[in-house]
Image (cartoon, rainbow, N blue to C red):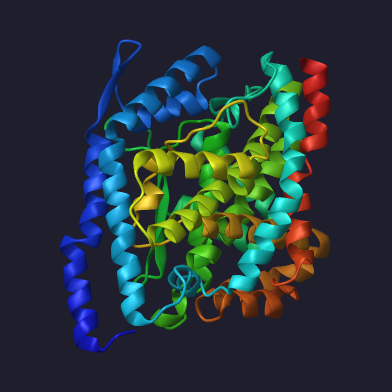
Amino acid sequence: KMNAELETLLSDLATDGYHAWGRLYGIISSDKQVEFDGETLSLGQLQNRYEDHPDRSVRERAFALYEQSFNELSRSCAMALNYQAGFRLTSYRHRGWDSFLKEPLMKNRLSAESLDTMWGVIDDNSARLLDYFAAKAKLMGVEQLRWFDATAPVGKVERTFSYSEAADFVVDNIRAFNPDIADFCRMAVDERWVEAENRSGKRAGAYCTSLPMSSESRIFMTYNGSYNGMLTLAHELGHGYHGYVMRDLPYGARSYTMSIAETASTFNETVVNHAGLASAGSDQERLSILATRLNDATTFLMNIRSRFDFERAFFEKRAQAQLPVAELNALMEASQRKAYKNGLADYHPLFWASKLHFYNTGAPFYNFPYTFGYLFSTGVYAQAKAEGASFQQRYIAMLRDTGSMDTETLASTHLGVDLTKPAFWQSAVDAALAPIGEFAALAEKLA
């Protein structure tokens, strides 16, 4: 970095410059409201309509209004994005950093070689998801999926679960994999570390936070009795367990990177999802659970890939000049076409304007760690399933070292794999895409 005085100056200027653009984006995107089917909705609520509503015509109209709304905001969004990037690039130049990926890779304790290998394996395999798209299109009675269809729900889980039933399902099925995790989950639920009440005025979403002084954690979520709500509970309890096994370590050794942060949470969710599939009571329920897994694969292998490719192309061009809205749209659509293997009938060129992650000044390139964590956890689950009880203590040791090892060393030490080589990533991608055949067969049966 530069000398301490200049770094202090840079930090002070960032408050009213770099970070201010991010706050401005948050204000203009959250203040915008629209009228839709007799309701006044925020853009976040409108997004839920186009992504999750079971009626395709509702999704189509919601997406059209969503694009229109962000088109109206696009000039302000472009200004924020350009000036944020300009601030970062100028900072990097004065520090003598030769790559705009240096900071995000450093923050994730990850090498460029491992990241490139992961994306290479994904590029070689993501076209396999086109079989999922084709089967889903047939279910919907359309020739080709559109953007708002890609992760839309199909099938239906008829079962509902009370909070106590969901907690029991999570604990009982995780116990078969690792009794230590199950004991933690039971304790967290019984000690009321989970704030799960579904009440008016409570915001959506879920998160887990660790309390280092008491060596405890607290989970915030709104449990609604659904199957997905049960998966969320399992996911957040995984975060809690990750912090719990590190509770006796020095504070500085408990800070793990975003690329590893989803390991324990996604592991828990995967265990429960497989158990849910095994206990599905109908073809429609089985189809819905398989679609949930393949929607995750679509998001992590295609959607986030397009975000990374867009942001990389944007920074390369932004080093020369500011980019107008039309050019940002073109870059975004080109990245989506590449990542989705031209598998959709249309795309979302204003995604760069609608996605908050591009404006997050605390985590540059707030995209690839999601895909990394998803595949890393998938690989960990595969090893746990193959090795059984012998993997349990190794899993705990790995989680304890997440705060004090770089990512490659962590994988080599505890999994015996080399993240700079394709083999690990190929096995993880194969596991993520494994449900395609069964989904296609079920879709053919039910279409």
Q: Residue at x 77, y 41 (%)?
A: 128
Image coordinates of residue 222 in percent, x first then y, are: 40, 38
- Which of the 4 quarters of the picture holds residue 420? bottom right
Task: Look at the picture and state if 204 lies above or below 409.
Answer: above
- Which of the 4 quarters of the picture holds residue 165? top right
Image coordinates of residue 326 in percent, x first then y, are: 39, 38
* Left or right of 126 on screen, residue 45: left
Between 300 and 334, the one lying in front of the other is 334
Name of the residue lying farthest toward the top: 38
Q: In the rendered image, is residue 386 in sight?
A: yes
Placement of the N terminus among the 4 image quadrants: bottom left
Placement of the C terminus among the 4 image quadrants: top right
Name of the residue lying farthest toward the bottom: 3
* Left or right of 151 on screen, residue 252: left
Q: Residue at x 45, y 23 (%)?
A: 63
Task: Look at the picture and state if 131 lies above or below 299.
Answer: above
Name of the residue lying farthest toward the front: 320
Q: Residue at x 52, y 43 (%)?
A: 232
Q: Residue at x 34, y 30 (%)?
A: 71
* Left or right of 190 on screen, residue 263: right
Task: Look at the picture and state if 275 lies above or below 60.
Answer: below
Between 402 and 94, the one lying in front of the other is 94
Between 78 and 32, the one lying in front of the other is 78
Image coordinates of residue 74 in percent, x first then y, are: 31, 37
Marker count (numbered): 0
Task: Look at the picture and state if 84 lies above or below 307.
Answer: below
Image coordinates of residue 122 in percent, x first then y, are: 70, 53
Q: In the rendered image, is residue 169 in sight?
A: no
Between 103 and 213, the one lying in front of the other is 103
